[in-house]
Image (cartoon, grey):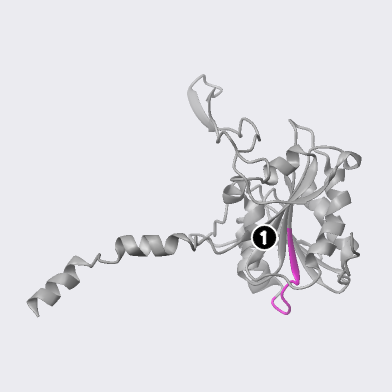
Amino acid sequence: MPKVPLKDLSNARILVSNDDGIHAPGLKILERVARSLSKDVWVIAPEAEQSGASHGLTLRRPLPLHKIGPKRFAVGGTPSDCVLMAVKHIIMDRAPDLVLSGVNRGANLGEDVFYSGTVAAAREAALLGIPSIAFSQVRKGDTLHWKTAEKFAPEIIRRLYTGSWPKSILMNVNFPPIPPEQVTGVKVAPQGRRLEHTQIKRIKDPAGRDMLWIGDFPTDDPQDPNTDLGAILENMVSVTPLECDSTDMPSLPQAAAKLSDLKPAKAARKRAAG
């Protein structure tokens, strides 16, 4: 493998955020990783857990902002709020050179990226024109191998940040649920889909009343093994570039052809009257 010329990150401004909250263990790990790379690290994260918040912005109430240490803030909002607050308010003198989100407690694979606040924080940065990477530590049951994320994240960051960064692209990285010495490699793979979708679970509340709970995916079995889900099953770190533009370009001509002769009724009446 040819040697990759790595860019020096020591003077880069790095913003660290997440969706598990300002006191989450994964955030502490990512902050340590960032500080091993740069002297200018800011941590701006939600004051409470925001898992599943997706790319929500808080529009109907003011956002509480608490300074809890040097270059360290908690925001009473979503992960997207945190990145927007950081860039547009807290560190306005100079935008971050890189945004790191995570390390999430659990996977963000396949269709998870649509619900994930971790990915949303990175996406918000990408929308603002800032290179960004979302990190997640896949777990088995309650076991989380945080050392795997901490071992592999620094080199992945160095290599991904080297050279030009495509506009409006974020990187989604997932670490397999095994100790670092058992990781078989790093695989760049497309986003996948699971064979089964989210389950609804029926539970009882303390008073014995029926309640419904949105549960986890029953398995991570992929529809296609050559995806991020498949990479994790192979005990590899998965890396997936995600694009902010969700347009399906091949479908545009077909949709346009179906709707080409559709005219607003009001406009049609005006022409007839004229």
Q: Nearer the viewer, residue 4 or 152?
A: 4
Q: Quadrant of residue 7?
A: bottom right
- Relative to 13, does residue 274 appear above or below in the rendering? below
Q: What residue lies at 64% left-to-right and 31% top-to-bottom? A: 219
Q: What quarter of the picture does the N terminus occupy?
A: bottom right
The kind of secondary structure the magenta stretch mainly shows is loop
Q: Quadrant of residue 66?
A: bottom right
Residue 64 visible? The answer is: no
Task: Classify residue 124 as left or right of residue 29.
Answer: left
Residue found at the far left of this picture: 273
Q: What residue lies at 74% left-to-right and 41% top-to-bottom? A: 232
- Image x and y of residue 43, in percent: 76, 61
- Relative to 50, does residue 209 appear above or below in the rendering? above
Q: Which of 207 and 264 is in front in this view?
A: 264
Magenta span contains residue 93: yes
Q: Nearer the viewer, residue 112 or 146?
A: 112
- Hey, what amino acid is under mark 1? Ala
Task: Classify residue 19 as left or right of residue 266.
Answer: right
- Relative to 80, does residue 148 appear above or below in the rendering? above
Q: Give the range drawn in magenta.
A: 92-100
Q: What residue lies at 40% left-to-right and 64% top-to-bottom? A: 253
Q: Mark 1 points at which residue?
A: 122
- Image x and y of residue 11, in percent: 86, 74
- Relative to 209, does residue 163 appear above or below in the rendering? below
